[in-house]
Image (cartoon, rainbow, N blue to C red):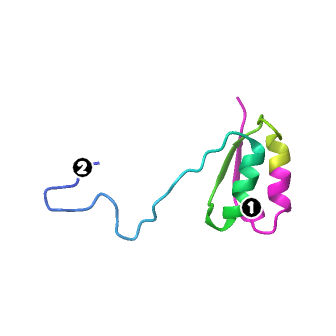
Amino acid sequence: MKSSSKGASPRPSNAKSSSVVAVSDGLKAWEVLKGKSQHIDLILTEVELPSISGFALLTLITEHQVCKNIPVIMMSA
């Protein structure tokens, strides 16, 4: 995105920055979620995961006091 010649910023000064945390399997995802659950706004996961299934991960999420409030989107190829 280009800024205008008037010096306008492409991002409002009150905008939050975002980052993505990617992991290779369900157990690693669960470890990240337990450790950083207050800083995660959305969980995007595949149904078919190595180590534990996406459904097993979803069960862990919904049973966790903090994680259960994070929206989850599950995908399947």
Q: Position of residue 4 (x, y in %)?
A: 18, 55
Q: Position of residue 57 (x, y in %)?
A: 81, 48
Residue numbers of the magenta segment: 58-77
- Going by the numbered disc 2, the residue's amino acid type is Lys
Give the residue at x 61% y 45%.
22
Q: Splitting the image into 4 quarters, where does residue 38 fall?
A: bottom right
C-alpha separation, residue under disc 2 versus residue under disc 1: 39 Å
Q: Which of these two is toward me, 57 or 7?
A: 57
Give the residue at x 68% y 39%.
24
Give the residue at x 81% y 69%.
65
Q: Secondary structure at mark 2?
A: loop
Give the residue at x 13% y 56%.
5
Q: Which mark is residue 2?
A: 2
Q: Position of residue 31 (x, y in %)?
A: 74, 55
- Going by the numbered disc 1, the residue's amino acid type is Lys
Q: Secondary structure at mark 1?
A: helix
**Residue of label 1:** 34
